[in-house]
Amino acid sequence: MDTTRLRETAQYLVADGKGILAADESTGTCTKRFDALGIESTETTRRDYRAMLFSTPGIGDSVAGVILYDETIRQETADGTPIPKLLLDQGVFPGIKVDTGAKDLAGHPGEKVTEGLDGLRERLAEYAGLGARFAKWRAVITIDEETPSTACLVANAHGLARYAALCQEAGIVPIVEPEVLMDGDHDVDTCEAVTRMAWDVVFGALKDHDVYLPGILLKPSMILSGKDAPARAGAEEVARRTLEGLLDCVPASVPGVVFLSGGQGPEEATEHLRIMNTLGDKPWKLSFSYGRALQQPALHAWAGDNANTEKAQALLKERCDANRAAALGKEFVAA
Ligand code: 13P
């Protein structure tokens, strides 16, 4: 295992004020987002949209990595530049989603287990050849009366650990993503208990599988009230509970924690990150790996028409710059 390369890649992705743009929506998910805005979803429109995002002037000021989907890492821009090259030329590392999705967990209605280990060694070798420096695997944990079950937590942690070990063997930094969903009316105490349990089980599995912690990034959800909870915890409380949970559960040798947005609004996700970065010392970097919270305003502005490129790119740049400030614990002042 090339521990130096893994460590350096992980540190690069969370260098001061830098974070990650998640643009690895599967074709199904991307189509759902396009459909909602009446945008036709074809290989070309998906390519045009992603190429528009990735050629935003100055994107490399705040984004050190972009997570791609299998279709995108193989695509070229309209002028023939391979997408990985478009990113690397701006100092942005290409990453790749390698799980094959969350499937129903047998015997546990309402719960999911993420699949994708079959053939993963060979796929990682191919992705490394296409320029991928890091990867992502997302596990999904649902909060309900009876869930999560131990079976769900253990099966997902096992998958994450085996994925992470395979990535490191291939010289690719694994982003380990256990997402506790916001769906439901649970309170913030419940989210905190479940999220801490998920982190504990995941780090136990990573240890069992001898995963090299300085060569991973953790991508967690924040500790939030359920989307439909009657009373929702405020920003200060979310930031404090999330940070305290991380301090208790995440080893100091992990170089960075990069949050998903998980359905938070763009400004809400930025504000939570900013507050956390004002709350005293922490052993790892705290930054972003947002999908919707970075892309949403730009997608709405682009609306399937390349004539809207400039406006859409300006909106993406604004979200990236706001999150750069948040990663540094600073207020963002729009230009
Ligand atoms: P969101 O920030 O939209 O939750 O997406 C991040 C991600 O990569 C989910 O797997």
Image (spheres, rainbow, N blue to C red):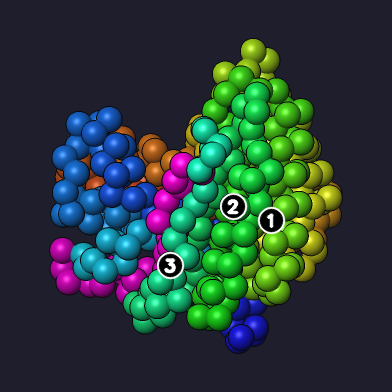
Q: Which residue is mark 3?
A: 118
Report helix, strand or loop for mark 3. loop
Decide whether residue 292 is among the magenta residues. Answer: no
Q: Where is residue 170 shown, x and y percent of the image?
A: 50, 80
Examine the image and state in which quarter residue 254 appears.
Answer: bottom right
Q: Is residue 265 above or below residue 58?
A: above
Please tell me which residue is depicted at 38% across the width and 60% down the height of the picture.
68
Q: Residue shown at 24%/34% (left/top)? A: 35
Task: Point out the frontmost of discs 2 and 1.
Answer: 2
Question: Which residue is at the far top?
Answer: 230
Cβ(mark 1) to ligand 1 < 8 Å? no
Q: Dot 2: what SS?
A: helix
Give the residue at x 45% y 76%. 121
Q: Tag on residue 202?
A: 1
Question: On the rendered structure, is 34 left or right of 281?
Answer: left
What is the C-alpha distance between the residues marked 2 and 1?
A: 8 Å
Image quadrant in which you'd find residue 12 = bottom right
* Residue 43: assigned label: none
104 part of magenta stretch:
yes
Per the rendering, the mark at residue 156 is 2
